[in-house]
Amino acid sequence: MEKVFSQVAAYFNVLSEPARLRIMYSVCGGEKSVSEVVEMCGSSQANVSRHLLAMYKAGILLRRKEGVTVYYSIADNATVEMCQSVCAKIAEGIH
C-alpha cells in the first residue's frame, strides 16, 4: 500500500496549485486549445503551458495536436467530480 499512498500523494500534489485548479475548471466543460485555456485563466501562455504539461504527465489531462494547435481535455471524470466536491465543500464554509 505504501506505493499506492505515494502515488496518491503525488497526484494530489499536482492538483495542489491554484493555477492548475483554474485550468481544470476551464477544460472540464470540454476540450480547449492552449490559447483558449490561456484566455480563460488570465495567465501567460508560458505559465499555462508549464501547468498543462505537468497535468498531462500526471495523467490528469489528455492532449492531442492538430497542426500547430494543441488541445487538452480531462482524462478522467472522477478527478473532475472530486475537485467539484472539494470546491463545493470549501465554498460552503466561506459564506
Image (cartoon, rainbow, N blue to C red):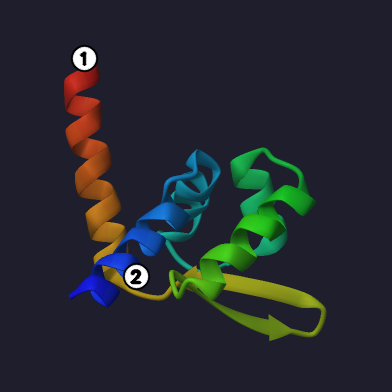
Residue 33 shows up from this direction:
yes
Badge number at residue 7: 2
Please tell me how many numbered marks the rendered image carries. Answer: 2
Q: Which residue is depicted at the point 18% across and 21% down?
A: 93
x and y percent of residue 31 in the render? Answer: 52, 69
Asked whether, in this view, residue 92 is left or right of residue 59, the answer is left
Badge number at residue 95: 1
Q: Which residue is depicted at the point 43% across and 69% down?
A: 60
Quadrant of the rendered image containing residue 34: bottom right
Quadrant of the rendered image containing residue 24: bottom left
Q: Which residue is depicted at the point 82% across and 78% down?
A: 68
The front one of 40 and 5 is 5
x and y percent of residue 48 in the render? Answer: 67, 52
The front one of 31 and 57 is 57
x and y percent of residue 27 in the render? Answer: 48, 59
Q: CA distance from mark 2 to mark 1?
A: 34 Å
The front one of 6 and 65 is 6
Q: Say which element carries label 2.
A: helix
Q: Say which element carries label 1.
A: loop
Above/below status of 5 relative to 44:
below
Residue 36 shows up from this direction:
no
- Which-is-in-front pick, marks 2 and 1? 2
